[in-house]
Amino acid sequence: MSLRPVVFLDRDGTMNDDVGYLSALSHLTLYPWAIDAVRLLNHAGYAVVVVTNQGGIGRKMIAPEFVGELHAEIARRLAAGGAHVDGWYYCPHHPEALIDELRVDCDCRKPKPGMALDAARDLGLDLARSWVIGDKWLDVQLAQRIGGRGVLVRTGWGRLEEAIRPDGQVVDAICDSLAGAVAHVLTADASDAR
């Protein structure tokens, strides 16, 4: 069985407005280009996987059940536009969690690779042909930890993150939005295939 190339997407600030701890469906606003960007990846044969830190669960700001409801709502909106996400992964842990069992040094909180490794195992993904797109350096660092390539987007926290780039931080591209990041991924991989 051949492994699929994959694009891992951060959620808040990359696919939708980052409103802090998103805790109500009424606060969900997908960026206008999000559906088209995901659909382009689908049509190009990439698996699309959302990987998101949701430490608000451990801090008792978000119910775990709500994360499932929110992902179902995003999936519904994507499907209405002919797009889909192949897998949804989230980390409920936080170093300041109020729930003891979630105050752990886990392997899944980005930039650690646990969510990506789980998705690769569950969905048959080729991490050597992976990309991670997000609005924080920890997304780019996740890409580096799994042997993939990373793109920082300027939406969400991205403009601020760009301004405080850590010394020595390598990134494959910095793009204005998810749409630009997807265009970069498709162009870079097409060029690599030549």
Image: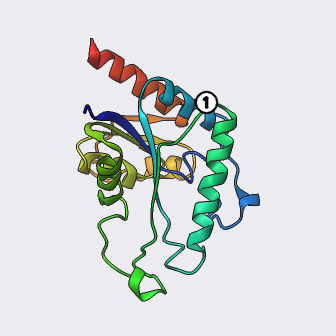
- Report the front residue among 110 and 101: 101
Q: Quadrant of the C terminus?
A: top left
The image shows residue 69, relative to residue 122, as above or below, that is: below
Q: Residue at x 71, y 65 (%)?
A: 24
| Left or right: 18, with 158 as reference point | right
Q: Indicate the quadrant where residue 68 lies.
A: bottom right
Observer able to see residue 99: yes
- Report the front residue among 162 and 72: 72
Question: x and y percent of residue 108 in the render?
Answer: 34, 64
Question: x and y percent of residue 135 in the render?
Answer: 48, 48
| Left or right: 168, with 67 as reference point | left
| Left or right: 78, with 137 as reference point | right
Question: x and y percent of residue 86 in the render?
Answer: 47, 43
- Report the front residue among 121 and 48: 121
Judged from the image, the secondary structure of the residue bearing numbered disc 1 is helix
Q: Quadrant of the N terminus?
A: top left
Observer able to see residue 176: no
- The figure's colour scheme reads rainbow
Q: Residue at x 50, y 48 (%)?
A: 158
Q: Residue at x 49, y 87 (%)?
A: 98
The image shows residue 122, relative to residue 68, as above or below, that is: above
The image shows residue 79, relative to residue 144, as above or below, that is: above
In the current view of this chain or complex, which residue is farthest to the front?
1
Q: Residue at x 66, y 67 (%)?
A: 23
Task: Identify which amino acid the numbered label 1 is placed on.
Answer: Asp
How many numbered marks, from 0 up? 1
Question: x and y percent of residue 90 in the render?
Answer: 46, 61
Q: Which residue is mark 1?
A: 36
Q: Residues within 10 Å of mark 1 (few under 14, many from 20)?
A: some
